[in-house]
Each structure stands twice: as structure tokens, then as C-alpha cells.
Amino acid sequence: MQVDARSAPTGAADGLGLGGTVRTTVGRLYRRFRSERADGDLGDTALEVLGWLEKNGPQSLTELSRAGRVAPASMSQSVNRLTSAGYAMRTPDPSDRRKVLFSTTTAGVALAVQTRSRRDAWLNAALCRLSLEDQAVIARACALFRSIADS
Amino acid sequence: MQVDARSAPTGAADGLGLGGTVRTTVGRLYRRFRSERADGDLGDTALEVLGWLEKNGPQSLTELSRAGRVAPASMSQSVNRLTSAGYAMRTPDPSDRRKVLFSTTTAGVALAVQTRSRRDAWLNAALCRLSLEDQAVIARACALFRSIADS
DNA sequence: TATTGTTATACTCTATAACTATA
DNA sequence: TATAGTTATAGAGTATAACAATA
């Protein structure tokens, strides 16, 4: 797909503009990731929350719900699946007894690491086939996307 | 939303590799898009299928299910919501009577156009605040992502 | 037999509303 | 009153399995 990045990005010819191009591209990639999954007993969202806990350490329900941009009640169910399956656990916060800190168990860490490596396998393979310059473009774009998503 | 304040937006330094950076970034952007939605009676998937029909013309159920990377039975329910709401319609294929062609109605076209512009509004605003060079980086990255997603 | 599409059923994810406990 | 978390309930999205109609 050889496209001049400046004047004729993928979506520019179909009248969607750069915003439309980004949105449809992200949607397509996301579905591609999802179709590559084929995991065990846990769903997409639960595994992702487990990954956050493993990477960023113990967090409260409110923190997790904001990170995932979902309602607290939604996140409560996701972490319930994790705790019921033995991959995460609750710890009351001593300083504020309304709060609960969620953290990974040993099994949870193992599952997070395993899931991550398997999920990233095909994507890393595809990225390795790109030139170093193209990889740098993608890394830079990801940084820009992060700042947009968090704005 | 100050979730990942500890890890820089680059993501390259968090030990996940570029593949992990891409996957988490896409996931975050996708959820951001979804949280921006707040549409009417139709959900995310149904609106996206409607957009495909409006953009690419009549398609069979099998074609749609492959485009969305979902099972035919799943797509059948999505198009059912569209037809029930009057935004799409079925047309038997004369040359192969097993097939059904799905296409947009007048109301469907209107909804697709309206949904698209509203959904892209905030994203286009964010992109416009970037430099032309950064916009070019994003456009180039989208082209690369497309080829990866379709591989 | 193979393909196309549908219905039946179950699970995940998400939302809103109502509730309890603590600050 | 405000915040943190939970439970109840409903709807969208997805999957597998079983089925009918057609090629």
C-alpha cells in the first residue's frame, strides 16, 4: 500500500479526512488483534485489566475504571472475574477504608506475561518486516496517539 | 486521564516492545472513540456495518462477516438490527438464491453520514492542533497499519 | 457434499439505578 | 453531603451448535 503520507493518506481519497482514516484504521487493527486472541477462560477486557495490574501495580477500582474509560460498576464485574478465577485479589486500604486495592496473584502474573507474549507475537513479526524508518514512524505515531487518547 | 503518568507516552521504554506499544495504544484509542460515541438506538458494531454498506455498496452476509472478522451468525444479528430499524434492507441474489444482498435505505445513508461526521469531530479537532509534520507521521503510520491489519 | 444464511443459546462487556459503608 | 464500591438488571456483541435451503 504505497501512499504519500502528506497528500494522499489511505482515507483521504474516500472523503473521510485524516480523522476518519485514523478511526477506521484503529477499528480495523483492534478487530484484528481481537481475532488473533483465542484465549482460555477470560475475555478481552479482563485480560487487559490483568495486564494493567501486572504492569502498573495495585490500583483501586476507581483508578481502573478511569483507565478503561468504563463505569465503576462495569469495572467491578471485570475485576470480579479476575478474583473469582484466582488471578487477582482484593486488599483493603488501611488509610481509607472505603477503598480496595486490586493486585495480581502469582498465577495472575504468569497469565499476564503469557498472554502478552502470545498476543504480540504476530504483531511483532509484522513490525520486524518493516524498515527501521517505518518502525520509527509507528513509534512516533503511537506517542502522538497516546497524547490524543489521554486528552 | 493521568492513568499512565509514570510511563512516558512513547511506550518504548516500558519493556513491551514496539508490538506491545502498538497494541496498547490502539486499545486505548479504540476505547476513547467508543466513549465519545453516545449515539442513539444503534450500537457501535451496527453503526460500523452501516458505514461499510454506505461506503462500499451492497454486500452479502458472508462478505460482511469476513470484513468484520466475526462469525456469520454474529453478523446476521448485526444486520438484523439494521433492517429492523429501517436502515438497511435485504435483496435476494437472482444468480444464487442462497445469497442475500444487504444494502442501505435512504434513512440508512443519512444516518451513516451523520454518524461519521459527529464521530470524527473531536478527533479532527485534536489532529488539527498537531503540526503538519506530525499529521504526516500519523497518516503514514495509518497506511502502514492498514497493510499490517490486512495481512 | 459444500455453501449460505438463520435461529437457539450462552457468555462477556457495558450501562444505569439503587444500595451500603466510609469520609 | 460526597466518595468508593457493590449488586441488580438490561441490552449489545460475540461464539458455537443445529438447522433449512440451495448449489
Image: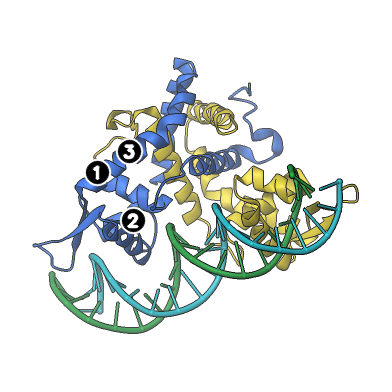
Chain colours: A blue, B yellow, C green, D cyan
Residue C21 vertical position relative to residue B4 in the rendered view, above or below: below
Residue located 38% across and 53% down the image: A42
Give the number of the mark in front: 1 or 2: 1
> Is there CB contact under 8 Å for labels 2 and 3?
no
Local packing at callout 1 (Cα closer than 10 Å; few below 14, some 14-19, many 20+) is some
Residue B8 lies in quadrant: top left
Kind of residue indicated by mark 2? Arg
Residue A145 lies in quadrant: top left
- x, y percentage for residue B36? 49, 55
- Name the residue that disc number 2 marks: A66
Say which of B98 and A4 sits in front: B98
First in sequence: mark 3 vs mark 1: 1
Local packing at callout 2 (Cα closer than 10 Å; few below 14, some 14-19, many 20+) is some
Kind of residue indicated by mark 3? Gln
Residue located 44% across and 44% down the image: B27
Instruction: For residue B103, say whether it is visible.
Output: yes
Both labels 2 and 3 in a single chain: yes
- Name the residue that disc number 1 marks: A109
Say which of A131 and B37 sits in front: A131
Of the 4 image quadrants, the one containing the N terminus of chain A is top right
Q: What is the chain identity of the residue bearing mark 3? A: A
Under tag 3, what secondary structure?
A: helix
- Tag of residue A114: 3
